[in-house]
Amino acid sequence: MGGFHFYKNGMPQYPLSRYDAIVLVFSGQLVPPTDEEIRNWSQSDWLSKTLAVVQTLWFVVQAIARWVEGLPITQLEIMTLAYTSITVAMYVTWWDKPKNVSGPFRVAVKELPELVSVDEWTWYGRIFYVIAGWHDRSITLRQERRVPTFYGGGILGGDANTFGADVIALIAAMVFGAVHCAAWHCVFPSYAEKILWRVSSLAIVALPAAMLIPILLMLVESLPDWDVLDQVLPFMFALFAPVYVAARLLLLALSFTTLRSLPSEAYSALQWTLLVPHFT
């Protein structure tokens, strides 16, 4: 969203990290914008977000209505329902997030805080930390011209807030996978496709659950030894990621291949849903 950008002689130099901004605020050299000012820069409001969520939930209502009426739901609709759960979760967590704020907040000071060192990671380590939400640990904003896409502005190193966010993300991933299990007893063109769907659905539920266990142990027992997770989670990620990606690709392919042979009831529409006002 632009963030805080250090300017010198009227020219942009580099973005400021969260640490830099906090130090400057406490030293009185930076007066951050108010909530109202940030909202004024945003290109979105509650009405547009509400309409988007309502339209998304309308598809859920239709799917539930088909199930209640005993009409079949295709595997493609089940997959769409899974993505709907992610869409709603995204809107909930990003409800107060400003949208399309491209211009930075200019900061012109004579002295900046001392540079905080960051960790160095291999290319596959960077991929893991992007997914885990720890991407900030390998980014030095003073070497960047703009805030990187996946930079979260968090505190360097693992903390309870970071792992709490990982818990929420993994639970959302499990819910996403569980929705695919709703097609467990759907009609499939072949027995092989049914088995592939079931195994893939279980995989995208079980793998996030397996990664969730060590994080929960660390949080519940309040153990400060983050180095254990730094070693265990990347190893688990290296093992699970290829399987998870393969399972997701299989489900995507099966959602389309199963369309070649649908029961006739799949083409039946619920007439009463057409009477409810909605967008198409």
Image (spheres, rainbow, N blue to C red):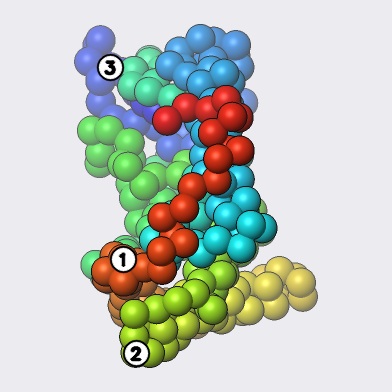
Q: Which residue is mark 2?
A: 192
Task: Give the quadrant of the N terminus.
Answer: top left
Q: Amino acid at mark 3?
A: Lys
Mark toward the start of the polypeptide (2 vs 3) = 3
SS state under label 3: strand
Q: Which x, y percent locates residue 145?
A: 23, 33
Image disc number at residue 163: none
Q: Amino acid at mark 1?
A: Leu
CA gap, disc 2 to disc 1?
Answer: 15 Å
Of tags 2 and 1, which is closer to the observer?
A: 1
Of tags 2 and 3, which is closer to the observer?
A: 2
What residue lies at 31% left-to-right and 41% top-to-bottom? Answer: 148
Q: Is residue 29 something one can see in this rendering?
A: no
Identify which residue, 217 or 139, lies in the foreground: 217
Q: Relative to 170, is 53 above or below?
A: above
CA gap, disc 2 to disc 3?
Answer: 64 Å
SS state under label 2: helix
Q: Which residue is mark 3?
A: 8
Identify which residue, 11 or 276, lies in the foreground: 276
Q: Relative to 52, is 213 above or below?
A: below
Picture quarter containing residue 243? bottom left
Callout count: 3
Mark toward the start of the polypeptide (3 vs 1) = 3
